[in-house]
Image (spheres, rainbow, N blue to C red):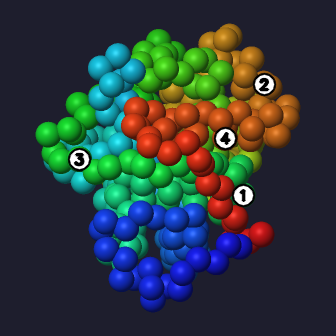
Amino acid sequence: MHSGASADKIHIKGPDHKGTFEDYQQIYNEIAELLESNSDYDDGSYGPILLRLAWHASGTYDIETKTGGSNGATMRFAPESDHGANAGLKTARDLLEPVKQKHPWISYSDLWILGGICAIQEMLGPIIPFRPGRSDRDASACAPDERLPNASKGARHLRDIFYRMGFDDREIVALSGAHALGRCHTDSSGYSGPWTFSPTVLTNDYYKLLLDEKWQWKKWNGPAEYEDKKTKSLMMLPTDFELIKDKEFRKHVERYAKDESVFMNEFRDAVLKLFELGVPFKQEERYTFKRTTD
């Protein structure tokens, strides 16, 4: 691990400080410590919700109007913070707030993305390069509602949402692999349950389960979702099922189910692209951070 300035020196760096690699690695390590020390949350980690924060901050980008995206951290403000797709994410923002207070020089925009990268890596996903340079914006820059995927919709909706950001079918399926992590909550999305049996470890199980398990509609009072027939403990959203109903999507599901390394590499590239959409970077260099478990 690279060791930069001591924590005490970092603590007094003001908002005009230009972060070094060592500074960002220090913040990465502090976020990883938060994940490790709060093992009583959900399935044992805040990792999935930190990834969801970074994803939802980035996934509002519109390639035509050049609006939305991770640059700005506008989810700090209403109306974006109140969008239905962002329900429950105050938990993730609040978790990172003490890190921001300790390191006032880092933008919320960069911090949220660094949190998402840390979450992926600490949950045994691929190493995701990080490039700093996002700046925070005010409420006037809030992204409009309905730019994020609606889980109740079909393949056409998925393509409309992701093509708007500049992704293709392969990248849509790769990014959907994030559903290997975490679970749905009735008080956030209305849906309930995890997609996989190991929701705090990134694997290709999401794709394998989609193809191999027998799924049925869940009988309950909530929104339409699937459950596995065998254990009735896993769930899939209507949009998840579109990935095996649509022949173009399905061929990528099959590729990822067959070879986890192919999934990890293509997931890494798609996430890197997602996290950098629309950001006016001033530096070319990207940093890669060591996992705290390495």
Q: How far apart are marks 4 and 2 (CA)?
A: 18 Å
Query: Pointers 4 and 2 in contact (CB under 8 A)?
Result: no
Front tag of 4 and 2: 4
Name the residue beneath numbered marker 4.
268
Image mark for residue 137: 3
Front tag of 4 and 1: 4
Image mark for residue 124: 1
Which is nearer the N-term, disc 3 or disc 1? 1
Question: Amino acid type of disc 1?
Answer: Leu
Residue 239, position as x, y percentages in the image: 51, 26
Residue 8, position as x, y percentages in the image: 45, 89
Judge from the rendering whether residue 170 lies leftward or rightward of residue 161; answer left or right.
Answer: right
The answer to whether one can see residue 51 in this image is no
Which is nearer the N-term, disc 2 or disc 1? 1
Which is nearer the N-term, disc 4 or disc 2? 2
Front tag of 3 and 4: 3
Front tag of 2 and 1: 1
Query: Along the line of sight, which residue is nearer the eye, 253 or 237?
Result: 253
Q: Distance between the residues labelled 3 and 1?
A: 32 Å
Which is nearer the N-term, disc 4 or disc 1? 1
Q: Distance between the residues labelled 4 and 1?
A: 12 Å
Q: Distance between the residues labelled 2 and 1?
A: 22 Å
